[in-house]
Amino acid sequence: MDLASEEDKEITIGAFNGWDESYAAAYNTKYALEQDGFTVAVESFDAGPAFTAVSQGDIDFIMDGWLPVTHEDYIQQFGDDMEAQGCWYIDAKNTIAVNEDSPAQSMADLADMADEYGSTIYGIEAGAGLTRMMQDNMIPTYGLEDWDFKISSTPAMLAQLASSTDAGENIVVTLWRPHWAYDAFPVRDLEDPEGAMGAGEVVYNFSYAGFTEDHPQVSQLLKNLVISDEDLASMENIMFSDDHYGGEDPDGAVAEWVEENDSFVSDWKAGALAG
């Protein structure tokens, strides 16, 4: 891929506030483009303003469009003014996670294992869609009305997850993929035989309409991007966990991750990540 042949070397990427995978993908793309002489800016937006900005050509692309559910309304509203630039992650979902060595294998097991988990599920913010899904779907579906669903914050949930796994104690938390907790802690998802947590989603890049013609090589780079669960969790872990960069210096975090995963960028540019 001859990225150096592109004449316009100014690129602006939109990332979603609070969405860790958005920054991991954006800053890895920034790194790859800067290798070939581009000047790249990553700007932070809430989802609505981000889709507005890319549809109007104020930014070049966003990397965190979730389909078919989360961002469906934005695609319907702005789709005529955008171009899809490839799907890079296929396992996005809300879920329930436990420590790896705990007994439950399925959400259906929990009702009979209250003593193992102290009848407690650790959740996140009250206003999160995941919290509403727990209250409306998961808890009644699996008969956990007598459990203590602790609604607090994402940092509080992660702190409890760290404390419990360090102590070798069983724990149940609300979680979602992608997330760096899967790299940082010994956790696994529970099966959801009733589908109470909803179907999975996929993550797309979206550019302004005409971007492919303006930037054919960058467009191909975006379409080449495929990030596995393992790679994405480790990217996010280095970028965001308190044991590493804690959300500070994302460029430094990406440089460290690329050094440890030295074939990723070359495979990406060669279109070999899907293999």
Image: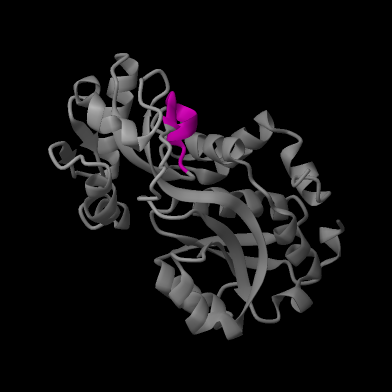
Foreground pick, 63 / 274: 274
Q: Say whether residue 98 is left or right of residue 32.
A: left
Foreground pick, 258 / 168: 168
Q: Residue furthest top?
A: 168
Magenta segment boundaries in residue numbering? 179-188
**In the image, residue 78 lies at what x, y percent?**
52, 82
Q: Is residue 125 visible?
A: no
Image quarter of residue 103: top left
- Can you say whether 20 is above or below 163 in the image? below
Q: Say whether residue 201 is left or right of residue 150.
A: right
**In the image, residue 165 lies at what x, y percent?**
34, 20
- Can you say whether 86 is above or below 252 in the image? below
Please tell me which residue is depicted at 43% across the width and 37% down the height of the picture.
191
**In the image, residue 114 lies at what x, y percent?**
20, 26
Asked if the stretch drawn in magenta spans residue 23, the answer is no
Please tell me which residue is depicted at 61% across the width and 64% down the height of the picture.
205
Image quarter of residue 48: bottom left
**In the image, residue 232 lies at what x, y percent?**
57, 41
Please tell me which residue is depicted at 26% across the width and 51% down the height of the picture.
131
How many numbered callouts?
0
- Can you say whether 60 is above or below 222 in the image? below
- Can you say whether 240 is above or below 35 in the image? above
Foreground pick, 67 / 19: 67
Q: Say whether residue 58 is left or right of residue 6.
A: left
The quadrant of the image that shows the N terminus is bottom right
